[in-house]
Amino acid sequence: MFFYLSKIFWFFVQPLNFAIFLLLAGLLAALIGRRRLAATGSVLAFLILALSAWTSLGAMMLNPLEERFPRPPLPQKVDGIVVLGGGFEGAINMVRGGYELNSGGDRMVETAILARRFPEAKVVVSGGTGELFIEGEGDAATAPRLLGALGISADRLVLENKSRNTYENAVFTKQLVTPKPGETWLLVTSAFHMPRSKALFDKAGFPTVPWPVDYRTSGKEGFGLFRDNAPDSLQATTMAIREWIGLTAYWLSGRIDQLFPSPGG
């Protein structure tokens, strides 16, 4: 139920969709003669789109998430690498049978680099299909084609293909891997996603070393206009809002212990 409610809620509140619904409400209000209500909906829609696409608001919201878990020194021994799904274009790969990467593809590239650096380490790819409306191939199904092409043998791969969100990533991976005391496992995911991911793996009883990748900010963001192109700014704002909502929902539901997880927490 949590999965479906979260997907439906996010469909309505993500900035672009929310602005469209406000414009639609404004249009309907205008048709029935409610001019003030129509103007209010239109102005709110404009503000949402302008702040999301024309300002650095998204980067400013992403940056604290990315800075929360700095990348540590690389351990001398690594027993396993867990990479969370979200780096592939699932709908395209399902049809074309390739391994097209999206903006989060650094997760898979970094995993391949780490796997070659630690040739004895197991590589766990955690990610099924987490979409309600878009049909696509889960990352755990696509990853063997890319990692195999990059020289990672299939016998090193552990594929977790049932998870639909980060909570299930942690729970199902723990059940599949059953890490032993004293083992060192790296957790690879986007830097903005690391606070929630690390907290969920800790809660599941799976100790990991955070290995953030896919940085979206420089760390020197300040508020300003036209700091990036509009589509990228809109994407950054959308990702940031989604992640902060995710942290809040997981904290309120008791799935994580801190609203803003920290390395010491």
Image (cartoon, helix red, strand yellow):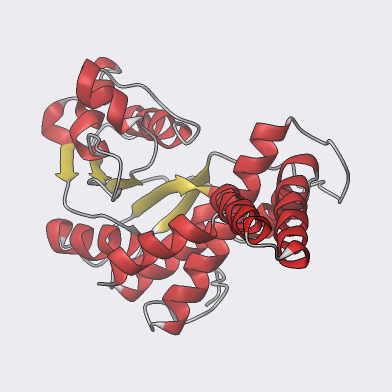
Q: Position of residue 101 (x, y in %)?
A: 40, 26
Of residues 55 and 76, the one nearer the viewer is: 55
Which of the 4 quarters of the picture holds residue 81? top left
Name the residue: 14% across, 28% down. 154
Judge from the rendering whether residue 139 lies leftward or rightward of residue 100; answer left or right. left
Which of the 4 quarters of the picture holds residue 147? top left
Of residues 3 and 262, the one nearer the viewer is: 3
Q: Is residue 115 visible?
A: yes
Q: As displayed, is residue 218 above or below residue 246?
A: above
Q: Position of residue 159 (x, y in %)?
A: 16, 43
Q: Position of residue 141 (x, y in %)?
A: 18, 34
Name the residue: 24% across, 38% down. 135
* Picture quarter with the N terminus: bottom left
Q: As displayed, is residue 130 above or below residue 181?
A: above
Of residues 130 and 18, the one nearer the viewer is: 18
Name the residue: 57% across, 73% down. 260
Of residues 115 and 83, the one nearer the viewer is: 83
Q: Position of residue 51 (x, y in %)?
A: 77, 50
Which of the 4 quarters of the picture holds residue 155? top left
Name the residue: 17% across, 37% down. 157
Judge from the rendering whether residue 160 lies leftward or rightward of residue 25; answer left or right. left
Judge from the rendering whether residue 171 lies leftward or rightward of residue 43; answer left or right. left
